[in-house]
Image: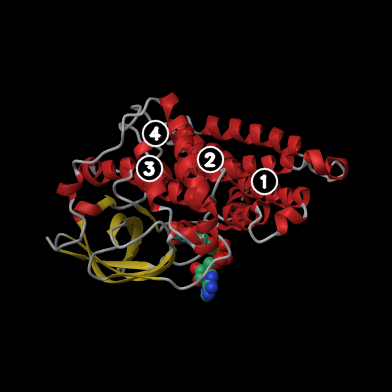
Amino acid sequence: MQNTGVSLATLSDHGPPRVPRGALLDSVKAVTATQLGPMVSSIDQEGVYPESVIRSLGEAGAFASHLHGVATGHPDLESAIRAMSKVSEYCLSTSFCTWCQDALGWYIYTSENASVQETLGAAVAGGQQLGGTGLSNPMKSLFGIEKMRLKAKRVPGGYTVKGGLPWVSNLGENHVFGGIFELEDDPSHRIMAIIDCAQPGVKLTVNDNFVALEGTRTFSIGIRDAFIPDEMVLADPIDTYIPRIRAGFILLQSGMAFGLIRNCIALMNQVRGSLGHVNKHLERQPTDFEENLALMEAEVFELCRTPFDTDPEYFRRVVEARLRAGEEAVQSAHYAMLHQGARGYVSHGAAQRRLREAYFVAIVTPATKQLRKMLADMNH
Ligand SMILES: Cc1cc2nc3c(=O)[nH]c(=O)nc-3n(C[C@H](O)[C@H](O)[C@H](O)COP(=O)(O)OP(=O)(O)OC[C@H]3O[C@@H](n4cnc5c(N)ncnc54)[C@H](O)[C@@H]3O)c2cc1C
């Protein structure tokens, strides 16, 4: 077997902590308050990658609760979302890295590849192995928006893959990510596998600066005849696997939105004493956002109970919930800015940062426009 860079044997000693359900949020809160809070400005302004925070979140159990068979014995997406939302109250870069880590674990534990679960999967769940997900392009491709960017050839013991992905986050030299490629000679045959950033044929480059989310270590990926061994394959073909991962992929993103909205409500309340006499004339008030947030959380947490449901009506509710999360994130940040006024508009003001960050929730795959297309397609 050719070297992929990832040594399954050396990772097998790692694993997620066994955190009782109730203790997870307290542990995550401790990490965010003591470690993340003081770093938020450098993450946003200097693009610092919060690696130490992400590792501590792993130790706290933040990346494990949604993985069946790991923490609580069943996939508890609600706890994972609540933990991610605590991170998002402070910083969307770190919260998105949390989602990347959560999604990677979700792919691994939803697959039937038991050896990757016991080795790489356990290390992802515990935050010892960091990584992400390159599924924007396939998720758009599967819904008829763009062509698949990664192509493969079958070779003895695995596949050779080539192509490029414009953005994949939470990466680094020793990181891995989940990717999907199609066979060159049979494009309807698609395979999902773990790709190792350190392996020959995989190149990471920085191609742009973003208005926010600079702390997410987002790279452009170039792949040139990289060998993906069968041991790293999660689903081949992906046809019945995608319906099993797609709801979890989407629902978990709610954590980014819920925490950001909660922080925006806090920013509105923060200036009530000094500016309430005039802010009360704004069309939307903190209580409006609180009510909507409670409704959104109730719907998402109910959907979280059955993430493998393949009923089209269930999936429609998932898509609608995700659409609301993106739109309400942008609205809450917009109103946080209007309530805060000039103190939110200074370069270190929280409101302007939250506004820049909020748009990411609405443009990360599945973006608002994709969600609207999916709903339109469901009606035909
Ligand atoms: C900070 C950040 C982190 C991201 N992390 C990930 C990740 O971890 N994994 C992942 O799979 N995706 C990631 N993405 C991609 C993201 O999920 C969306 O796919 C992306 O924001 C565009 O989605 P869209 O549906 O709005 O497509 P659109 O922006 O409408 O269209 C996307 C297409 O437009 C073209 N395009 C876009 N920008 C440019 C440009 N500057 N120059 C030339 N052509 C361009 C490309 O062909 C691209 O495929 C990230 C994006 C950002 C901004």
* Mark 1 crowd level (few <14, some 14–19, many ≥20, 10 Å Cα): many
* Mark 3 crowd level (few <14, some 14–19, many ≥20, 10 Å Cα): many
- List the residue tagged with mark 4: 65
Q: Return the x and y of residue 232 as percentages of the image width and height.
A: 23, 53
Element type at marker 1?
Answer: helix
Q: Separation of disc 1 and disc 2 at Cα?
A: 14 Å
Quadrant in the rendering for residue 192: bottom left
Residue 328 — which label? Answer: 1
Q: Separation of disc 1 and disc 3 at Cα?
A: 29 Å
User: Contact, CB < 8 Å: mark 3 with mark 4?
Assistant: no
Residue plotted at (44% across, 47% down): 98
Closer to the chain start, of discs 1 and 2, is 2
Q: Is mark 3 within 8 Å of ligand 1?
A: no
Residue 56 — which label? Answer: 3
Question: Of the residues tagged 3 and 2, which is closer to the observer?
Answer: 3
Residue plotted at (35% across, 58% down): 179
- List the residue tagged with mark 2: 85
Element type at marker 4?
Answer: loop
At label 2, the amino acid type is Ser
Residue plotted at (55% across, 41% down): 318
User: Contact, CB < 8 Å: mark 4 with mark 1?
Assistant: no
Element type at marker 2?
Answer: helix
Closer to the chain start, of discs 3 and 4, is 3
Closer to the chain start, of discs 4 and 1, is 4
Q: Separation of disc 2 and disc 4 at Cα?
A: 14 Å
Closer to the chain start, of discs 1 and 3, is 3
Q: Separation of disc 4 and disc 1 at Cα?
A: 26 Å
Q: Is residue 274 above or below residue 179?
A: above
At label 1, the amino acid type is Glu
Element type at marker 3?
Answer: helix
